[in-house]
Amino acid sequence: MKESIRARPWAGLDLGAFSVKLLAAQPGVGGMRYWVAESLLPQPADGADRLRAPEVVAQAIADCFARAGLHPRSFRGTSVGISGSDVIVKQITMPLLDDDEVGPALRFEARKHLPFELQDLIIDFQVLGRYASQKKLEVLLAACGQEHARRVCAPLDLLGIDVDILDAAPLALMNALVQGAESRREAFLLLDIGHTSSHLALYQRDEPFFSRRLDFGGLTLTRAIAEGIRVPFEEAEEWKLAAGSDQPGFRVDWDSPEMLAVHHCLRHDLVEELRRSFAFYGTLGQMPDPLKMWISGGSARLPGLAARLSEILGFPVLLFNPLERLGVSPRAGQLPPIAPQFAQAYGLALRTA
């Protein structure tokens, strides 16, 4: 069914620890229109990861709508990302069943794969493949805690906005990366570097889907800079944000004390975690060959970060800039031309009901 000429936009909201990102997409006869906006959240002085009051996040969401020039009621629907230690995305194998039998059977099958009580979880699934000769289904299972989901949705409840789709962050990120790809047969590997943690996701046809949450983020880099050059955390954070911005006259030198601290942190904290993740995936399926990885997230704006990771890892690492995929300039907000922090919001905006 074709979209109406006046179809209302669909909103993708990434409620991050550092900022709220909005990307709205509206289909039309002349192609897609997009709106993007970002609103920063107040940060603890010591960089500690604390839960933010729903009222604070709600204000940031409302600010995004205002920056984009859109009213919360103007959307056809809203997708919101969810992440955390109790958000699980896992590929499982089930007996060959009809479509209407998969859901009920999954509640029993999930007991074997989820370390939580089922009554405390919200469960969704997608059938990836049917193999009649082997009498099996490959199913992508997604689950999260009900209380966690309520906390994520609470700021939108305050604004009177219904969440139409609550999507696991790794799936939204992979949806963004795969969109518009020339071939779905290639391997898609993405590292999204968030403020307090990162998501690693790998998708390739006929192999297990893999995602892992890493305890590494922009805060990790800030602390490394602060310790490496012995300055207060606030000063290190200010320097890092300036380095990743389009601030005129600010040049980044990887031989500077700050970037040497970043390099040491990447090599000894992030890269070791990546290699352990790749080794574990090798026990589940075949690693892509050749290997290529995309990076996104706010910290991916650090100049030369992709090239430095490529040098350390020994395979190509590329910057994923979703705004480039849109093919148009942002309609609202003073955003830089390179904005990898919008990867999740882009993938969520594509998840129209």
Image (cartoon, rainbow, N blue to C red):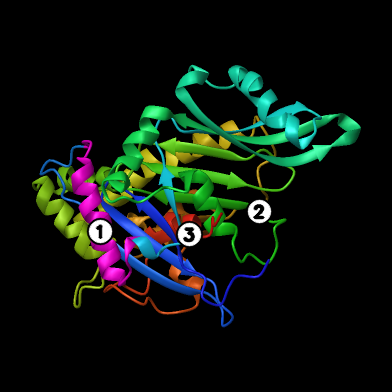
Magenta span contains residue 50: yes
Q: Earlier in the sequence, mark 2 or mark 1?
A: 1
Instruction: Give the image location of residue 41, x and y in percent.
Output: 20, 52
Q: Quadrant of the N terminus?
A: bottom right
Residue designated by label 2: 290
Q: What amino acid does circle 2 point to? A: Pro
In this picture, residue 193 sits left or right of residue 237: right
Among numbered discs 3 and 2, the one appearing first in the sequence: 2
Query: In this orientation, does residue 336 appear?
Result: yes
Identity, as a three-letter code, of the amino acid under mark 1: Ala
Q: Position of residue 274 (x, y in %)?
A: 48, 40
Which residue, given by chain and number where applicable, does mark 1 sit on? 62
Contact (Cβ within 8 Å) of mark 1 with mark 3: no
Q: Nearer the viewer, residue 307 or 23?
A: 23
Choose mark 2 or mark 1, whichever is in front.
Answer: 1
Q: Residue furthest right?
A: 133
| Residues shaded magenta | 49-72
The image quadrant that residue 46 belongs to is top left
Q: Which residue is mark 3?
A: 349
> Residue 142: x percent and y percent?
55, 35
